[in-house]
Image: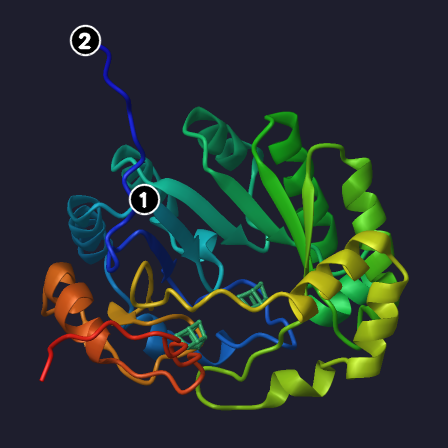
Amino acid sequence: MMTQDTLTPLPERFPYACQWEVTCRCNLRCVMCYTDCFNRPVAIRQELSTAEILRIMDELAEAGTLELCLTGGEPLSRPDFFNLYEHAISCGFLVTVFSNGTLITEAHADRFAALLPHRIEISLHAVTRETFEDITLGQGSYDRCLQAIRFLLDRQIPLVLKSTAMTLNHSEILAVKRYVESLGTVKFKLGEELRPELDGGTGPYQYALSEQDLVELNQQDADLQRDACRRDSVEPPPCRSGMHRFHIDAYGQLQLCSGNRRQSYDLRTGSFHTGFFEALPTFACDWKAPEEPALIRLATHHA
Ligand code: SF4
Ligand code: SF4
């Protein structure tokens, strides 16, 4: 007898995708960074240990999580980064790594090639050394970033290069995009969003472009304009944070998303299952669009 495979929709609440800020430490001090305020020894000492991260990863795998994004800070600034990465791969996660690229050596690229990530996303702020290092405040960071890109490309590791458009690199964004396109298989992502620092500081906003500058930037490139039109014209999909997506910070706090950390559940003392299924549903977000009321409601009872 022939059987037909069917795709089963995800349950309404399922811990499908995790973004995990495994550290706030970083070798750079980018001017618009929102985690740099916790890149201090006293805060770093409170971050999750290797054993704690591995234990929580096992709980995510047990719960069925598929996508795991390791971010920071700079994840490779953790001395145990490859222990964490290789454990994540062995758990069966599709692993994405967000990095500034500047710590990736040829030996690291070999380790990524041996156990392929889903993708690595590297921030490429500019095409000139001067602008790049005006942003990162790290002498030599431009050359190290480009070198890492070459190491990863040589090994055909899936790569995304991204820039956040700011006052400092505004005039180089299109050149970054053209450079990325010249690399063939590499994707380019433009970010427009700057965030407040984790301690509430608003420093990053001083580098924000005006609405008019963003419009003019997008108008200069067909792809950027198409993406901007799509963002403006399509109703945003309902937020799935807390339903299918979740965030863990460097101290083991489970949260709705990276942008809303007002309420947390401590994974150091509680289980992931309890945190995801019992605590997260009680967390609020003022920015979540309310559910549209149904035009026709089914009667649940009759008088
Ligand atoms: S590389 Fe990322 S984490 Fe490091 S200072 Fe820059 S923005 Fe912050
Ligand atoms: S709507 Fe709220 S929970 Fe959803 S992504 Fe935005 S800040 Fe996070």
**Residue placed under numbered mark 1 in the picture:** 66
Q: Are marks 1 and 2 in contact (CB under 8 Å)?
A: no
Say which of 250 and 263 sits in front: 263
Instruction: Tell me the quadrant of the picture where the C terminus can be found.
Output: bottom left
Give the amino acid type for the residue marked by disc 1 in the picture.
Leu
Q: Residue at x 54, y 44 (%)?
A: 120
In the rendered image, is residue 101 in sight? no
Q: Residue at x 90, y 61 (%)?
A: 220
Q: Residues within 10 Å of mark 2 (few under 14, many from 20)?
A: few
Q: Secondary structure at mark 1?
A: loop
**Residue placed under numbered mark 2 in the picture:** 1
In the picture, measured across the screen, residue 99 lies left or right of residue 228, that is left
> Which image quarter: residue 52?
bottom left
In the rendered image, is residue 219 in sight? yes
In the picture, measured across the screen, residue 81 lies left or right of residue 34, that is left
Q: Residue at x 88, y 72 (%)?
A: 216
**Residue farthest to the top?**
1
Residue 151 x/y as whole percent: 63, 33
Say which of 39 and 127 sits in front: 127
In the picture, measured across the screen, residue 229 lies left or right of residue 212, that is left
Residue 292 x/y as whole percent: 41, 77
Number of the label disc, if any, that sits on residue 9: none
- Tell us which disc is closer to us: 1 or 2: 2
Say which of 237 and 182 sits in front: 237
